[in-house]
Image (spheres, rainbow, N blue to C red):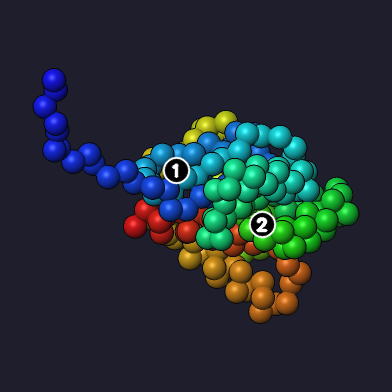
Amino acid sequence: MAKPSFKRNAPKKEVAKKILIACEGKYTEPLYLKAIKQDLRLSTVKITILPHDGTDPLSVVNKVLDKRQDVKREGTWEKEDLAWAVFDGDEHIQKDPNNWYQAIQKAKKENVRLAVTNPSIEFWFLVHFQDYSANIAPDKAEKLLKKHIPNYDKSGCYYPELLNNARTNNAIARAKDLDNLAKQNKLPEYANPCCSGISQLVDMLLGMGN
C-alpha cells in the first residue's frame, strides 16, 4: 500500500484577465503583438491574437465580437476582460466611408476598443524613432521608416530588437502629443496623423508586464 503523501501541490495561477485582439493586417500587426505577448510572458493574463479574416474595419470588429460571444457562451467572460480591433484609418475612410463609420459605431455600442493605426502601422513604428506631426500618406510613412529600419518588410518582426521598450515609451509619448494636438485643432475623430489607439493598446500591455 502506498504511503500517503503530505506534499502540497504548487498552487495554480488562474487567468485573471482575458484580452481578445483582432487585426486587419495578416502579418505586421499580429507578428508585432505576438512578439510583445511572448516577451511579457504574463501568467495571469490570456492574450489571444485572432487569426486573420476580413480586411475591412467592420469585418475586424465583427471578428472580435464573434470570438467574444464564443467565450461568453463558455461562461468565462468577465467584466474586466477586453476586446480590441486593430485596423488602418485613412485608406478605409476614403475607400468605403460607410463601412468605416459602421465599424466605429458598432465598436462603441458593443464596447470594443479601437487601435486605429492612422494612416498605417508604419506610422506607429516611425514615431518610435522621430517626431512627425504633419499629414502623411502610407507610402511616405514606410519610406521614412526605412531610414531607421533599412530592411523593413511587412512580414518581418522588429520587436524588441529595434522597437525596444525605450523607443516604445518615446512612441507612446509622441502619440499622446499627437492626440492632444488633434483635439486642440478640433480635428475629426481618428484624424490623420493619430496613432493613440495602437499606443493605448501597447501601453496597456506593457503596463501589465510591469
Q: Does residue 86 appear in this view?
A: no
Q: Position of residue 72 (x, y in %)?
A: 63, 48
Front in this rendered view, residue 98 or 92: 98
The image quadrant that residue 207 belongs to is bottom left
Image check: 101 left or right of 208?
right
Front in this rendered view, residue 166 or 145: 166
Q: Does residue 183 appear in this view?
A: yes
Image check: 154 left or right of 38?
right
Picture quarter with the C terminus: bottom left
Instruction: Find disc 2 in the rendering and name its residue.
Output: 112
Picture quarter with the N terminus: top left
Instruction: Find disc 1 in the rendering and name its residue.
Output: 37
Residue visible at 57% across and 51% down in the picture:
77
Q: Position of residue 24 (x, y in %)?
A: 68, 42
Secondary structure state at the residue bearing disc 1: helix
Which residue appears farthest toward the front when viewing the image?
Answer: 1
Q: Position of residue 121 (x, y in %)?
A: 61, 47
Amino acid type for the residue under numbered disc 1: Lys
Q: Which mark is residue 139?
A: none
Choose the circle earlier in sequence order: 1 or 2.
1
C-alpha separation, residue under disc 1 versus residue under disc 2: 20 Å
The image quadrant that residue 43 belongs to is top left
Residue visible at 73% across and 53% down in the picture:
89
Residue visible at 41% across and 39% down in the picture:
38
Amino acid type for the residue under numbered disc 2: Val
Front in this rendered view, residue 147 or 118: 118
Q: Pointer 1: residues within 10 angstroms few (<14), some, or many (20+)?
A: some
Residue visible at 74% across and 46% down in the picture:
62
Which residue appears farthest toward the top when viewing the image?
Answer: 1
Image position of 105 with respect to 31: above or below: below
Disc 1 versus disc 2: nearer the observer: 2
Image check: 125 left or right of 183?
left
